[in-house]
Amino acid sequence: MKHALLLTLAGTALSPLAAYAASPQEVLTTYADIAEATYGDSLQAARNLRGHVEALIATPSPQTLQAARAAWIAARVPYQQSEVFRFGNPIVDEWEGKVNAWPLDEGLIDYVDASYGGVSDENDYAALNVIANPTFTLSGKEIDAGEITPELIAQVLHEADEVESNVASGYHAIEFLLWGQDLNGTEHGAGARPWTDYASGETCSNGNCDRRGDYLLAATDLLITDLEYMSAQWAEGGAARAQVLEDETAGISAMLTGMGSLSYGEQAGERMKLGVMLNDPEEEHDCFSDNTHNSHYYDGLGMRNVYLGEYVRIDGSVVTGASLSDLVAEADSAVDDALRRDLDHTMLKLGQIKSTAEAGLSYDQMLARDNAAGEALIMGAVDALVAQTRSIERAVTALGAQEIGFEGSDSLDNPDAVFQ
């Protein structure tokens, strides 16, 4: 269970910041420009992924499956940098569950190993297997799923029966369809779905290969549609951009809220420390592909982008401008220096996890109960993120913000509750 970390901070409102070298309006414009670019890159990468998905379905082979997997991993790079725009921006937070919800009961979508189990007390549809069943009953209603479409996924299947783990759309549904289940526990190895799961005729493995391809393509098309929507929200005339720019106090608070909540409760707590406490690879963010080290790294980079007012696009160009750092430095240069150092230290610790995973020790191995070195790597990053959050709190104070709520996590705030 998450708790709100409430900061009640004495000070003036943000209006005096207009006298600073960088005005709040300029800072917020940079923030919106970076959001537009980050979601735009995410959209471009998703469209590239679709091309590889089409190739896999048209000509299944080890090569086309591997190319689709590589395109999925590349698509995560810009998207994870966008997560800092959550929490403080309701338009983003209300939408995010469509594209990045996890963990998921993958048996809703496709076949699973016998060890997975079946229907649970929490989810009647944990083993529904839509791909194998063109008709089924959901919430007492007969569903015709003879044609798997983006509309079926979005309007019928996703969070079916209001169960959050019924994740039918987004990056992780696609990830599952490309990799399959990771049955290695805390041993090395990702999911190993065979390319023949998309083959035709007698070569088809595990049945329903045509419907599996239909689901993968529909889910990818839906991801593109959802990213088109969010890109438009941050473009000129978009609702998210307008909301941020219309009120300087609320806009700066949104920036700080996004940084603090992602840094503390979401990444340090729910995504990292919780997995260490439970020694559970199911708590990995990208559990099917063993790409969690990259997701953590680019989440961290997204926070740094927002604070420094700089984002490197996938084509190598740079979006930059007046930054939150400029405002904090004007108010208290020591606070700005400390936060910059903490952001750099966090990236160092996340980079160590990333390089270690790329050298062959995967993130799920780091979570193993007897892997003290792996735990130290993860907890080093957790500690850096918590320290970074304290510096964000000091930046809030320096800017005179009066009340900001950061997301919390039982794993950080009340560890005993995790095991209750």
Image: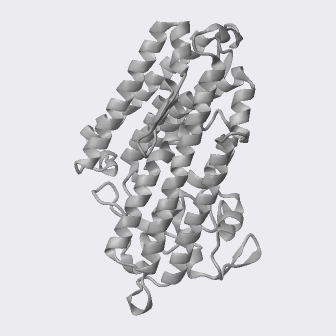
Residue 136 is situated, as x and y percent measured from the top left of the image, at 67, 79
> Does residue 102 appear in this view?
no
Residue at horizontal 74 percent and vertical 69 percent from the top: 139
Q: Indicate the quadrant containing the N terminus: top left, top right, bottom left or bottom right.
A: top right
Q: Position of residue 275 (x, y in %)?
A: 42, 44
Give the total of numbered labels.
0
Asked if residue 55 lies left or right of residue 190, the reply is right
Q: Nearer the viewer, residue 124 or 92?
A: 92
Location of residue 3 with respect to 108 vertically, above or below = above
Residue 67, horizontal then vertical, whole percent: 37, 66
In the image, what residue occupies the spot 51% across and 83% down? 210
Residue 10, quarter of the rendered image: top right
Residue drawn at (58%, 15%) of the image: 22
Q: Residue furthest left?
A: 359
Residue situated furthest right in the rendering: 141
State the residue at coordinates (47%, 84%).
207
Q: Position of residue 117 (x, y in %)?
A: 49, 69
In the rendered view, would you say 237 is above or below 181? above
The type of colouring in the image is: one colour
Q: Nearer the viewer, residue 252 or 131?
A: 252
Q: Is residue 10 above or below residue 378?
A: above
Does residue 314 lie above or below 222 as drawn?
above
Q: Confirm whether residue 111 shows in the render.
A: yes
